[in-house]
Image (tube, rainbow, N blue to C red):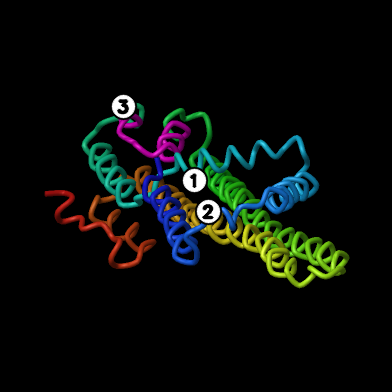
Amino acid sequence: MNIFSLIGLIISGVVLFVGLRLSSPDLQIFLDGPSLFIVLGGTFAATSVAFQLNKIGNLFKIFFTQFLKGKTVDPTVVIKDVMKICEAYRNGESLEELVSKAQDPFLKEAMELISDGILETDKAIQILEQRAVKMGALRNDDTRKIKALGKFPPAFGMMGTTIGMIVLLANLGGADAMKKIGPAMGVCLITTLYGVIVANLVVIPIAENLDEISKQMDTKDEIVLEGIKHIINKSNPILVAEELNSFLVPKERLDWKNATA
């Protein structure tokens, strides 16, 4: 489970609650059924138009599988595996025996494709590169969809506010009209508040989180593609570590001296 991202969502909820509580001891003034319906219902309706109603379930799947269940990628683990596999392959073990030592699914898939021996090495590498590009495109597409959702709640929040203002102005008559303005304005602005909350505390942060995970996965896949070439060539593990570390910033690189100790 992506525990740190989940904790971030909880912190966002706590900050919102405390902020509302400090603003007013009566939290019921921030509750309005029609406003919530306009924002959530409108967002759902717009999403169904943008991404087709029968495919909305995929967005929830992205949320659960990539955000809640997703894990932060650690490329140094892949580098360690490639080093160990290279060393074992240099010492005479077969690729078929070494497949089980690959923890990363893509690395394992690459080794299985190479060890089968059905395709020429160059063709197998080409296929793996195509798969990496396609998987990266799919991840980016999922992120794009979630980011697109962030545009809808604020828009429907403004629409709800506009509706509320129309109703307010239409009823400005009578001796007690001035007494109605304050409460009515409060209800109008609640819709905007809901739109801002849904977009900026939920949807947009989740989209940014998925975008970061996608970038990490792209880097990891590049390391795998370069690593499988080193495995095929039975490269020296130290050379493997130094070259694969080039994909990472200095503070994230593997200390191969301690890794091989």
Q: According to the image, label 1 marks what residue?
A: 67
Verify CB contact (< 8 Å) between mark 2 and mark 3: no
Residue 99 is left or right of residue 141, and the answer is left
Q: Nearer the viewer, residue 48 or 193?
A: 193
Q: Nearer the viewer, mark 3 or mark 1?
A: 1
Q: Nearer the viewer, residue 110 or 229?
A: 110
172 lies above or below 55: below
245 lies above or below 122: below
What's the residue at 21%, 37% (across, down)? 91
Verify CB contact (< 8 Å) between mark 3 and mark 1: no
Rendering quarter of residue 167: bottom right
Q: Which residues are magenta?
A: 98-113
Instruction: Give the CA distance from mark 3 to mark 1.
Output: 34 Å
As helix, strand or loop, the secondary structure at mark 3 comes to: helix
Seen from this angle, which residue lies furthest bottom? 178
x and y percentages locating residue 138 in the rendered image: 61, 47
64 lies above or below 215: above
Please give the label number shown on residue 80.
Answer: none
Residue 211 appears in the picture as rendered: no
N-terminal-most mark, 3 or 1: 1
Mark 3 crowd level (few <14, some 14–19, many ≥20, 10 Å Cα): few
Residue 134 is left or right of residue 101, and the answer is right
x and y percentages locating residue 250 in the rendered image: 29, 67
As helix, strand or loop, the secondary structure at mark 1 comes to: helix
Q: Is residue 234 magenta?
A: no
Instruction: Give the CA distance from mark 2 to mark 3.
Output: 40 Å
Residue 187 is left or right of residue 18, and the answer is right
Mark 1 crowd level (few <14, some 14–19, many ≥20, 10 Å Cα): many
Please give the label number shown on residue 97.
Answer: 3
x and y percentages locating residue 84 in the rendered image: 25, 42
Residue type, numbered disc 2: Ile
As helix, strand or loop, the secondary structure at mark 2 comes to: helix
